[in-house]
Image (tube, helix red, strand yellow):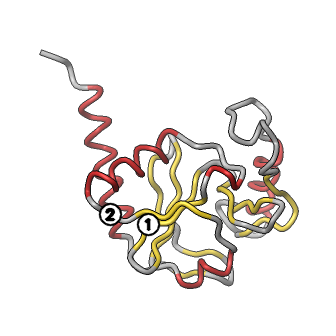
Amino acid sequence: MISGRYFKNEISPLSSSKTLNYLENMLAGREAKRNGCQRAILLNRRGEIAEGDISNIFFTRAGFLCTPCTDCGILPGITRQVVLDTCRVRGISIREGRFKPGILKEAGEIFMTGTLMGIVPVKSVKGLFEGTSFEMSRMLAGELERLRHRETSPKA
């Protein structure tokens, strides 16, 4: 669900820093659960998609993999960067930009990323999206798992 009470401050120097101050994100997550949803999507002060309550967000649209740019007030996560790098290597077109929530109605697929959660497909966003295809998120989750396995395998 899109949080209607909590927002990311895209001009704050803290928005792109990993600090211990995640109170607004935590409150947005609680708001989502009270409304029967698993996760929240936070907008910034301009009403643009920023990030999930504990994740970065991606969606496919018109042949592109789209994600909010860092100027939207997001924390540029490690898994987000792995996804971007993987897509560049595979020749998948990427668009980092500013997106209003209505664009999710046109999404083919939405997924969220985080260090602990990995890559998680989004099945629905209240009133905006109902997912049926999870090809991109499955492919990228497989790539991420291969990278993690390679990093933890004993070196000869």
Q: Residue at the left extreme?
A: 156
Task: Specify the quadrant that holds the C terminus.
Answer: top left
Residue depicted at x 61% and y 79%: 103
Q: Secondary structure at mark 2?
A: loop
* Above or below 100: residue 151: above
> What percent of the width, then of the height, locates residue 31?
81, 60
Task: Specify the quadrant that holds the N terminus.
Answer: bottom right
Residue depicted at x 29% and y 26%: 152
Residue of label 1:
65
| Left or right of 87 in this view: 35 | right
Q: Residue at the top extreme?
A: 156
| Residue type at numbered disc 2 | Ile
* Above or below 77: residue 73: below
Residue 92 marker? 2
Q: Residue at the right extreme?
A: 5
> Disc 1 and disc 2: Cα gap in Å?
7 Å
